[in-house]
Image (cartoon, helix red, strand yellow):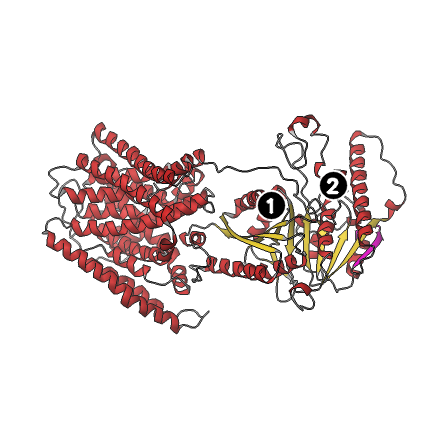
């Protein structure tokens, strides 16, 4: 017998226990009269509706929870359910029991996962500030909820005022941690101090909400004496203690039994998944909600490979299929038409405004105590308003326990959706982190002073990229005179999963195992670089993580480069070498990131084609020998490549070969083109570049005249074929080619080489060296020099462009970044 609030108080539904599957349409059966086909149809409807809404709301940057709740409301009695035929066919009362059961199973496992992902020690490490903000942001809304309960509470609702206060208070004061994490990533605030505080406070808030929820449920059994409530609370505490002191050691024993790096046996995983059910059963029998048991059970599972395995096995199925069911059920219970009268709607609006204001005021007060700017305090307060799962659970429990009637339930659901929905747009408009666009001059290697710090931003997708990059940095010759500052940026794709978000939250150095694969990778990458930092002098390493969709990842990289004022960004090529020496694409999206980065970078960029750069003999850290070759054709990118190689040649272990290619007809004085206006400018531009090349090469040759380890040769060539032959003839002792991308430089030397290039973003020569058929195992670094923003930069003072006073000349200085004085800024 299922009860459903169907305008009458109690509705009794009769089930036919054997009507599970149909005999088929041909037997004259209507599949929707049977519980299984009906359930499958409902599930499909729910998932399809929520997915469509996710797509619709994506441009408004709304979190997924919103589309799930709205999807439920749409299918429920508020919108589609108004059509009685639809309601009785698709969501008849008899189907409620199956739906509720499945939704709660999904919820059980989802909260188990939330428990597994939640890191209690992170809460211990959060510090006083986050704690204070969490408490501040909980007390005020709780009080407001309490006051409102007196307005909403009706005398005939056979239940005590206290419980009602507790329920409304908890519902208004919780913050949804997983939803907040998604919103922060959307707004690109996750790496900021503000983001960190928000995450920590939300974690603490989440924990408090659970404790309060357990109390609310225990006290919600309103028709019995207070003694029963006491027993509920005591036995709940006993269950938690049992989990911590019995279950956790047992699970630790399982982990110890499994050797490092092996996968966990099926038996253990099944045991744990059954354990979720059992703990749910126990807590339900005690009288708290079954979800509470699953959550506690998830909390006691130690972070590490086991948690990772469980998350990977369950996450997509649970959060993709079963969880939307729970939200749909909440939506089906929400009947917006039950909110009668303007006064009630005004109250709803008031609740929304006051609860938001309460959160913001509470958070703002605390943040002002800690001397944070007002704007940041308000933003934090807004962010703490995210509602999600816990809120919905509180409301559902309240509805089941008859604490909330239809009207208050509908009001609270609307409040939750509105409060979460307005966050992203408002935060985007009020909080713009101060971008410090101080124009800085040293945006290229060629411009960097030989005795100043050399700043590099290294982007890493997977640990596979790390060894070559470290060897490249080691070859870049860090010295006391010119130390290298490396910013290591681990690029992580922002997926719909909460687990990917947590990676930022865990502070390093805790020596604790990672929460998920992304974080395990991050740990490996960071450890490798920190290790390198300890073993080499004059290098500082700062690890960072960028979590964003691949389409906008280049913005993160560019902003960071601008912030940290780096001279060079190194990013891996999107293909890696296979065992047989060919090149295959790691992930096509990486290519898009690289192309966007080349187009928008605020400094020079190097794309590293990684074919291993191990150095022929490794003697000691400072004695690695590398044979580096630069192919110089002319143009700004090639000068930048030469500048980098020049820096490397100072390293006692490096040998440098510079091969300059000269077009045969350039040797005779080139004839001027017809005095056609365009032709002339192109010609003078080319002459200009040629002159800069000559000056730079001459300066280079003067400086290296006595250096045994540097060889300079010139090659005459007429066309692409001769160039190709010359490159192939270079002895195979090199382990790194550095070439310019050669963008915008047309030269007879590369004629015909671009006709069948696979990756035009590497330029003609880079593409040639990176292709699979170029028989060699040499890594290639393709360099593009930063060229100012050109005249179309609406008067933004780009580095080296004239100041605002001389703006009228800005157009004449098209090649501002390559102005001749750069050449006489001797590097060494």
Q: Which-is-in-front pick, marks 2 and 1?
A: 2
Does the segment drawn in magenta span residue 715?
yes
Is the residue marked by circle 1 packed among few (<14), some (14-19), or many (20+) residues within 10 Å?
Answer: many
**199 above or below 801?**
below
- Residue at image position (50%, 57%) is 522
Q: As drawn, which residue projects farthest toward the right?
A: 668
Q: Is residue 515 left or right of residue 460?
A: left
Residue 642, given in percent of the width and then of the height, sits at 74, 51
Judging depth in this view, the residue of 706 and 168 nearest the camera is 706
**Is the residue marked by circle 2 packed among few (<14), some (14-19), or many (20+) residues within 10 Å?**
some
Residue 394 location, x and y as percent? 25, 47
Q: Does 681 appear above or below 457?
A: above
Q: Nearer the viewer, residue 742 or 3?
A: 742
Query: Marks 2 and 1, how far apart in space?
Result: 24 Å
Q: Is residue 90 magenta?
A: no
Residue indicated by mark 1: 597
Q: Quadrant of residue 681?
A: top right
Name which of mark 2 and mark 1 comes first in the sequence.
1
Q: Foreground: 553 or 513?
A: 513
Q: Residue at x 57, y 44 (%)?
A: 558
Q: Can I make out residue 324 in this image?
A: no
Residue where numbered disc 2 is placed: 822
Could you say where residue 791 lies in the image, as x and y percent from the top left? 67, 32
Which mark is drawn over residue 47?
none
Q: Secondary structure at mark 1?
A: helix
Res. 338 image quadrant: top left
Instruction: Determine the main secondary structure of the stretch shown in magenta.
Output: strand
Q: Are marks 2 and 1 in contact (CB under 8 Å)?
A: no
What is the x, y in percent for residue 137?
Answer: 32, 42
- Observer able to see residue 106: yes
């Amino acid at each position: 017998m299922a009860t459903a609030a169907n305008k009458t108080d109690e509705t009794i539904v009769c089930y036919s226990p054997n009507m599970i599957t149909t005999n088929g349409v041909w037997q004259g059966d209507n599949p929707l009269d049977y519980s299984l086909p009906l359930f499958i149809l409902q599930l499909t409807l729910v998932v399809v509706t929520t997915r469509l809404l996710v797509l619709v709301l994506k441009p408004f940057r709304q979190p997924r929870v919103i589309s799930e709740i709205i999807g439920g409301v749409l299918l429920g009695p508020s919108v589609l359910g108004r059509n009685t035929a639809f309601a009785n066919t698709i969501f008849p009362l008899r189907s409620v029991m199956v739906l509720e059961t499945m939704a709660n199973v999904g919820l059980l496992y989802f909260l188990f996962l939330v428990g597994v992902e939640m890191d209690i020690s992170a809460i211990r490490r959060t510090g006083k500030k986050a704690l204070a903000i969490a408490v501040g942001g909980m007390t005020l809304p709780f009080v407001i909820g309490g006051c409102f309960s007196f307005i909403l509470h009706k005398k005939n609702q056979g239940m005590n005022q206290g419980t009602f206060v507790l329920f409304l208070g908890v519902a208004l004061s919780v913050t949804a941690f997983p939803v907040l994490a998604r919103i922060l990533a959307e707004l690109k605030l996750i790496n900021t101090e503000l983001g960190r505080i928000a995450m920590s406070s939300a974690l603490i808030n989440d924990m408090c909400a659970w404790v309060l929820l357990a109390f609310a449920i225990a006290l919600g059994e309103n028709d019995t004496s207070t003694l029963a409530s006491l027993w509920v609370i005591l036995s709940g505490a006993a269950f938690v203690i049992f989990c911590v002191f019995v279950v956790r050691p047992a699970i630790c024993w399982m982990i110890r039994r499994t050797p490092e790096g092996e996968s966990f046996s099926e038996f253990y995983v099944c045991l744990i998944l059954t354990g979720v059910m059992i703990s749910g059963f126990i807590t339900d029998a005690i009288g708290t909600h079954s979800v509470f048991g699953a959550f506690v059970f998830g909390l006691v599972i130690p972070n590490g490979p086991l948690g990772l395995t469980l998350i990977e096995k369950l996450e997509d199925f649970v959060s993709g299929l079963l969880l939307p069911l729970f939200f749909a059920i909440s939506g089906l219970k929400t009947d917006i038409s039950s909110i009668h009268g303007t006064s009630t709607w005004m109250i709803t609006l008031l609740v929304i405004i006051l609860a938001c204001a309460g959160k913001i005021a509470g958070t703002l007060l605390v943040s002002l105590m800690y001397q944070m700017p007002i704007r940041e305090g308000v933003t934090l307060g807004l962010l703490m308003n995210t509602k999600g799962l816990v809120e919905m659970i509180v409301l559902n429990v309240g509805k089941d326990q008859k604490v909330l009637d239809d009207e208050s339930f509908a009001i609270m659901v609307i409040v939750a959706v509105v409060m979460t929905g307005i966050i992203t747009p408002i935060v985007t408009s009020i909080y713009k982190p101060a971008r410090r666009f101080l124009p800085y001059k040293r945006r290229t290697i060629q411009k960097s002073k030989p005795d100043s710090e050399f700043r590099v931003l290294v982007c890493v997708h997977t640990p596979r990229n790390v060894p070559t990059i470290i060897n490249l940095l080691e070859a870049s010759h860090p010295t006391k005179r010119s130390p290298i500052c490396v910013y290591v940026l681990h690029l992580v794709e922002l997926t719909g999963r909460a687990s990917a978000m947590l990676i930022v939250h865990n502070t390093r150095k805790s020596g604790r195992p990672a929460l998920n694969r992304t974080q395990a990778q991050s740990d490996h990458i960071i450890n490798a670089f920190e290790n390198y930092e300890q073993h080499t002098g004059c290098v500082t390493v700062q690890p960072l993580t960028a979590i964003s969709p691949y389409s906008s990842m280049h913005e993160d990289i560019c902003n960071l480069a601008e912030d940290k004022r780096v001279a060079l960004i190194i990013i891996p090529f999107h293909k890696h070498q296979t065992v047989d020496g060919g090149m295959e694409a790691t992930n096509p999206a990486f290519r898009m990131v690289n192309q966007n980065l080349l187009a928008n970078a605020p400094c020079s960029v190097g794309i590293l084609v990684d074919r291993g750069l191990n150095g022929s003999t490794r003697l000691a850290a400072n004695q690695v020998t590398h044979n580096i070759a630069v192919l110089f054709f002319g143009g700004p990118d090639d000068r930048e490549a030469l500048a980098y190689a020049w820096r490397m040649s100072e390293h006692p272990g490096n040998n440098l070969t510079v091969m300059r290619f000269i077009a045969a007809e350039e040797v005779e004085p080139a004839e001027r083109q017809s005095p056609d206006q365009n032709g002339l400018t192109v010609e003078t531009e080319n002459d200009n570049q040629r002159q800069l090349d000559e000056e730079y090469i001459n300066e280079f040759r003067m400086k290296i005249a006595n250096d045994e380890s540097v060889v300079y040769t010139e090659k005459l060539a007429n066309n692409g074929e001769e160039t190709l032959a010359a490159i192939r003839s270079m002895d195979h002792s090199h382990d790194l080619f550095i070439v310019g991308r050669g963008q915008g430089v047309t030269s007879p030397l590369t004629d015909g080489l671009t006709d069948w290039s696979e990756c035009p973003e590497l330029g003609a020569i880079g593409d040639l060296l990176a292709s699979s058929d170029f028989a060699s195992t040499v890594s290639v670094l393709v360099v593009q020099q930063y060229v100012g923003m050109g005249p179309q930069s609406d008067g933004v003072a780009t580095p080296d462009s004239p100041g605002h006073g001389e703006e009228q000349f800005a157009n004449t200085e098209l090649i501002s970044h390559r102005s001749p004085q750069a050449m006489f800024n001797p590097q060494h």
